[in-house]
Image (tube, grey):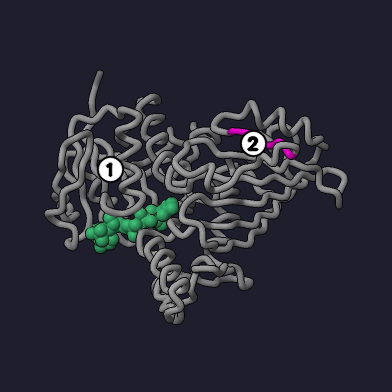
Amino acid sequence: MRRYRVAIVGATGVVGQELLKILAERDFPIAKLTLLASARSKGKHVEFQGEALRVEEVSENSLAGHDIAFFAAGASVSREFAEGAIERGALVIDNSSAFRMDPEVPLVVPQVNPKDILRHKGIIANPNCTTTIMVMALKPIDDAASVKRAVVSTYQAVSGAGIKAMDALFRESKAYLAGEAVQPEVLPFASAPKHYQIAFNVIPQVDVFQDMMYSKEEWKTVHETTKIMGRAFGITATTVRVPVERSHSISLNLETERKLTREQALEILSKAPGIEVMDDPAEMLYPMPFFAQGTDLVQVGRVREDNSIPNGLNLWVVGDQLRKGAALNAVEIGEKALELGCLAR
Ligand SMILES: NC(=O)c1ccc[n+]([C@@H]2O[C@H](COP(=O)([O-])OP(=O)(O)OC[C@H]3O[C@@H](n4cnc5c(N)ncnc54)[C@H](OP(=O)(O)O)[C@@H]3O)[C@@H](O)[C@H]2O)c1
């Protein structure tokens, strides 16, 4: 079996670390693994399959000679180094937002639009974490009943904003419980003019505000969903950061062309790839971040007909945003590209 030379840019971050775990778990066919990050991490060692690998600083040279380069170091790093990696022969699978809405770049969730991989020109973009988790539940319902409108409300874990936001939740919680002053420095986003504590709080802002007073994260949900699904329908979103360590939760209200009962929706979802139905009100069984963290399946529950319209459904969708929302989806894109035989452009 052929093995491939793989690089991870951002190997020391939360997504990079998860990528390492998933590549090992799935026994991705690796011949050589290169770990790259900023100058801050140069010389650190990270374990992979029992071996301590040295982290190097990312540069055009360090990216030469790879078949696949997973980027997980933010949009500016992807913009600076992705093109060079492609010119040196790699397929770039990018976790950042840098190229997601570029019409030349496929934006892929392998269970939803795998064939889009075939038209890549060197880069395949991995969608925003909330969007990936949401479309996993949206797609089977759309196939069965054609979605007319989606109202999306998110409850996003701090790890979605990276290692510093995770540290902030623990640091702030300790200070708050000790009766000490809390000094928020990270959320809603690091470069914001002011910061709010996330410990014992929720923040209805994920990223900067843009058109119509929607946040960038809310627009990503709208535009990326349209691109992945390959057709436009009404989508509106409210994205909120909550004091959860890991796994995003989404309330998904759907209006469909054809009516689906709760039982029909449960049947459809139970057969959908990558979905685990957790829905037993009598047993108080429903998805929660604690159930989803560290798992690969997107969990769906609280399935109900919408009481306010003839053809409507409410779903509660939870997924580990570091796995299916980022690293797992990226590795699955890589696996699919190998299967389709379309690695380099
Ligand atoms: N967290 C999530 O749930 C999630 C989900 C989907 C997509 N993403 C996307 O994935 C990317 C990584 O996010 P993250 O949450 O893993 O962030 P993170 O925990 O803050 O890690 C960032 C990584 O990027 C590296 N990096 C930062 N600046 C760099 C530079 N100038 N040159 C080279 N490397 C640099 C860091 O290296 P050092 O350790 O050396 O600083 C670290 O390895 C982002 O684009 C993010 O939007 C994240």
The answer to which of 136 and 298 lies nearer the viewer is 298
Considering the image in quadrants, where does the N terminus appear? Answer: top left
Residue depicted at 53% across the width and 61% down the height = 217
Mark 1 Cα within 10 Å, few/some/many (few <14, many 20+)?
Answer: many
Residue depicted at 22% across the width and 34% down the height = 49
Q: Quadrant of ligand 1?
A: bottom left
x, y percent for residue 204: 59, 68
Q: Magenta includes 277?
A: yes
Which amino acid, mark 2?
A: Met
x, y percent for residue 336: 41, 29
Seen in the image, is 326 located left or right of residue 203?
A: left
Which amino acid, mark 1?
A: Ala
What separation in Å lies between label 1 and label 2 (alpha carbons)? 35 Å
From the image, tell me which residue sits under label 2.
Answer: 278
Tell me which label, 1 or 2, sits earlier in the chain.
Answer: 1
Mark 2 Cα within 10 Å, few/some/many (few <14, many 20+)?
Answer: many
Q: Quadrant of residue 173?
A: bottom left
Disc marking residue 168? none
User: Dot 2: what SS?
Assistant: loop
x, y percent for residue 294: 44, 41
Query: What span is in magenta?
Result: 276-281
Q: Is 221 situated above or below 344?
A: below
Disc marking residue 69? 1
Nearer to us: label 1 or label 2 = 2
